[in-house]
């Protein structure tokens, strides 16, 4: 592990105006994110962290261009790798969606099947997804997580869309929507769970594209937020009912996409405000860390073509920065913080360690190692 680096963030005052939660009991705590350690991997390629084995300090990375997985220890030493062709019988396919550790096994979710390997990437078994995927297939997100229900291990997965065959512009899509599948590792059964809550904006008579949750599973509890919604959801897997508890998130500002009529299609030609978006969600030491962008009104959105692409991106990042909120308890939230520009948190492990991607594009020269940071959430 590498030398500790401390980077503190400037915080901005939050004017809570969005969401239904009453925040009068909030202590208005301010937080910073501090880099406390790092892992460096001597590997040529653009790696992405997929999973962390917290008990053994193992790190699973994927290199997209080669479609190669590598497993490293905390010193960054490569222990094993997997780069078989996507059409190989023991492969997960051409692109892995998500992956996680279950004991000393690696479970990879591909587009059409779930494959289980040992730590040397020797094939153990696989389960074919029992329904055709109609939604977006997301690669590199933490969409596969372990759950412990009545002392049995299951997996909670977001596969890109519900099991129902209806299209996103049909009302049936929302009335039959299931956010997650509960996967039995022995039988390979996919059980649809967590329908939309009645208060959800996706249940109010409009159609939406790309409904995607950010979620965290802790034992038999799921907490999640949709990327373009302002509700915080909780669900107890140990109960037979699909009951959800929700509360409004008091964002300082959050521009909502109004949706479009059933039977129609999204209008991508007419200029519109840039919608707000939840980028990541993590449960850290019984607190909930929410990373988001508020969006931009139409009048504040820079016009394309007036500057270079890089300048346009820099202006957007300045006007619509990545922020964070900390949910300290039910209905109690921190002040809004500005996320750093040199790293972005991507994973939290079983030891409550938060791991972040280094923004190598901001460095003056190409780094010799691929680096991930261990980040601490620290109250001021």
Image (cartoon, rainbow, N blue to C red):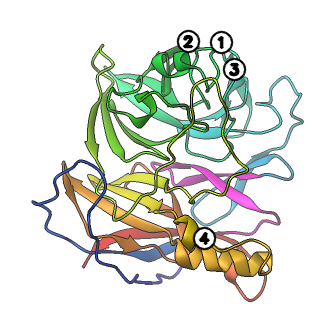
Q: What residue appears at the point 27 percent right and 37 percent down from the top-left corner?
A: 246
Residue 190, position as x, y percentages in the image: 55, 15
**Marks 1 and 2 close (CB-CB < 8 Å):** yes
- Is the magenta region chiefly helix, strand or loop? strand
Which residue is label 1 attached to?
Answer: 130
Mark-to-mark CA distance, 3 and 2: 12 Å
Split into 4 quadrants, where in the image is the C terminus?
bottom left
Is residue 1 visible in the rendered structure shown here?
A: no
Which residue is label 2 attached to?
Answer: 189
Range of residues picked out in magenta: 40-63
| Image disc number at residue 301 | 4
Disc 3 versus disc 4: nearer the observer? 4
Disc 1 versus disc 2: nearer the observer? 1
Is residue 248 visible in the rendered structure shown here?
A: yes
Mark-to-mark CA distance, 2 and 4: 46 Å
In the drawing, does residue 144 fall left or right of residue 118? left
Mark 4 neighbour density, 10 Å: few (under 14) some (14–19) many (20 or more)? some
Of the pair 190 and 213, the residue shown nearer to us: 213
Pick whichever of labels 3 and 2 is earlier in the sequence: 3
Mark-to-mark CA distance, 3 and 4: 47 Å
Image: 53 above or below 153: below
| Image disc number at residue 126 | 3
Mark-to-mark CA distance, 1 and 3: 12 Å
Residue 113, position as x, y percentages in the image: 70, 23
Mark-to-mark CA distance, 4 and 1: 43 Å
Pick whichever of labels 4 and 1 is earlier in the sequence: 1
In the drawing, does residue 12 fall left or right of residue 26? right
Tell whether position 55 is magenta. Answer: yes
């Amino acid at each position: 592990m590498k030398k500790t680096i401390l980077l503190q963030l400037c915080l901005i005052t939050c004017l809570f105006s969005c969401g239904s939660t009453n925040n009068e009991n909030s202590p208005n705590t301010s937080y910073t994110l501090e880099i406390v350690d790092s892992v460096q991997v001597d590997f040529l390629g653009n790696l992405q962290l997929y999973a962390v084995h917290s008990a053994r300090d193992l790190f699973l990375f994927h290199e997209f261009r080669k479609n190669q997985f590598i497993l490293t220890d905390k010193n960054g030493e490569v222990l094993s790798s997997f780069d078989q062709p996507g059409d190989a019988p023991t492969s997960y396919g051409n692109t892995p969606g998500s992956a996680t550790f279950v004991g000393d096994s690696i479970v990879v979710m591909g587009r059409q099947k779930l494959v289980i390997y040992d730590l040397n990437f020797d094939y153990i078994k696989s389960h074919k997804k029992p329904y055709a995927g109609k939604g977006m297939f997301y690669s590199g997100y933490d969409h596969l997580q372990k759950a412990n229900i009545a002392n049995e291990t299951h997996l909670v997965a977001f596969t890109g869309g519900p099991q129902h065959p209806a299209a996103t512009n049909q009302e049936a899509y929302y009335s039959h929507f299931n956010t997650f599948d509960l996967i039995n590792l022995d039988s390979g059964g996919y059980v649809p769970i967590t329908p939309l809550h009645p208060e959800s904006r996706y249940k109010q008579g409009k159609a939406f594209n790309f409904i995607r949750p950010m979620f965290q599973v802790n034992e038999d509890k799921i907490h999640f937020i949709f990327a373009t919604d302002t509700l915080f959801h909780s669900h107890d897997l140990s109960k037979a009912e699909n009951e959800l508890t929700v509360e409004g998130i008091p964002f300082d500002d959050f521009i909502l996409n109004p949706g479009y009529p059933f039977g129609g299609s999204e209008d991508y030609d007419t200029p519109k405000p840039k919608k707000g978006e939840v980028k990541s969600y993590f449960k850290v030491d019984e607190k909930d860390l929410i990373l988001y962008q508020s969006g931009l009104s139409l009048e504040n959105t820079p016009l394309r073509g007036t500057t270079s692409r890089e300048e346009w991106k820099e202006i957007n990042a300045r006007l619509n920065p990545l922020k964070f909120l900390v949910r300290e308890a039910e209905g109690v939230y921190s002040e809004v913080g500005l996320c750093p520009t040199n790293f972005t948190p991507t994973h939290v492990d079983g030891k409550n360690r938060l791991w972040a991607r280094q923004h190598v594009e901001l460095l003056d020269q190409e780094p010799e190692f691929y680096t991930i940071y261990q980040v601490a959430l620290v109250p001021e």
